[in-house]
Amino acid sequence: MPELPEVETTCKGIAPHIAGQRISNIILRNANLRYRVSDNFKTDAIGSVIDKVERRAKYILLRTASGTMIIHLGMSGNLRVVQNDVPYNKHDHVDIIFDNSLCLRLHDPRRFGCVIWTQENPKQHKLLKDLGIEPFDSAFNGNLLFACSRGKKITIKQFIMDGRIVVGVGNIYASEALFLAGIDPRHPAGRVSKSRYEKLASTIQSVLREAIESGGTTLRDFLNGDGKPGYFQQRLRVYGREGESCLICSQPINQQVLGQRASYFCRYCQT
DNA sequence: CTTTTGACCTGACAGC
DNA sequence: TGCTGTCAGGTCAAAA
């Protein structure tokens, strides 16, 4: 489900309901997520107050004075705020219940997501410490992408999806940004010019911004913190549109697997 | 070091 | 109505 816009939408949706709230209980129905939820999570976290809701890459950080929850939604996860008497459904694995009777509920059919409890600095956690730059950081630009890409033989699509370079760009928005930049996703990253990287940095930012404004993309199961879908899928230009006509030249959109992921592009408009 | 592959897991859908 | 195979928003560890 979630790339940066969906995670950002989730953070913005849940933060007003849970920031400043004290955790009164935690229900763990299934601890077997991508990483097993640690045994001390419940005892350590109950009673603490959510000081801050933060996003880093596709991770959501819920900070308290006694530790931080590092949450990832994997492919199929969503986090929503419900009243604590709302019955749980299949795949509702974790409930974090607050004094104000609201419940932050993690739903994740495939269980590729995680909830990690850490008392250390979460930014130094193994999963976060080597992450690349945020696409909305002022230092993110074409020069940076150009410099990082020299000598790389992987395709440019795989390159911009590499979280050690830039975070948050997943399979949908990689195809969308490359279409908007007019760049063939199959092109070797190391042979793309600086001026094309400048254009690409700009289209990565604009497509992510546009998707956040639409509330994210709901292909199958994404819901925001209030349980509502996003609407950006209606504005996708190439993703999932194989055989449909290109919005620029009307030729059929192509699909090709790159790095084991379906990639969509127009072979005439993207060179 | 870089790149590729397999693994994790459930559900939806197409085709027989 | 099954059954089988394929595919899906991510990303990590191991193999090459």
Image (cartoon, coloured by chain):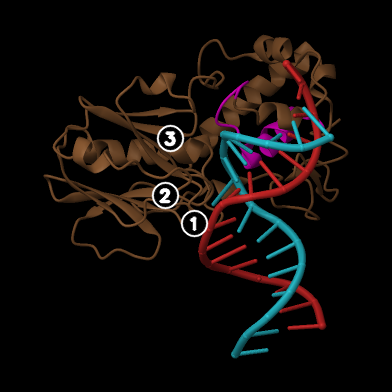
Chain colours: A brown, B red, C cyan
| Residue A68 % position (x, y) | 30, 29
- Cα separation, mark 1 vs mark 2, equals 8 Å
In the drawing, what numbered circle is on residue A10?
none
Front residue (pair B10, A144): B10
Is label 3 in a helix, a strand or a loop? helix
| Residue A262 % position (x, y) | 74, 47
User: Which one is earlier in the sequence, the residue at label 3 or at label 2?
Assistant: 3
Mark 1 sits on what residue? A221
Specify whether residue A125 is in view. Answer: yes
Please name the amino acid that badge 3 sits on: Glu
Q: Residue A167 lies in magenta, yes or no?
A: yes
Circle 3 marks a residue in which chain?
A
User: Which one is earlier in the sequence, the residue at label 1 or at label 2?
Assistant: 2
Mark 3 sits on what residue? A8
Residue at 50 percent of width and 16 percent of height? A137
Callout 1–callout 2 Cβ contact below 8 Å? yes
Callout 1–callout 3 Cβ contact below 8 Å? no
Residue at 49 percent of width and 37 percent of height? A5
In the drawing, what numbered circle is on residue A78?
2
Front residue (pair A150, A13): A150
- Cα separation, mark 3 vs mark 2, equals 12 Å
Is label 2 in a helix, a strand or a loop? strand
Please name the amino acid that badge 1 sits on: Asp
Q: Which residues are magenta?
A: A164-184
Circle 2 marks a residue in which chain?
A
Is label 1 in a helix, a strand or a loop? loop
Please name the amino acid that badge 2 sits on: Asn
Residue at 39 percent of width and 34 percent of height? A60
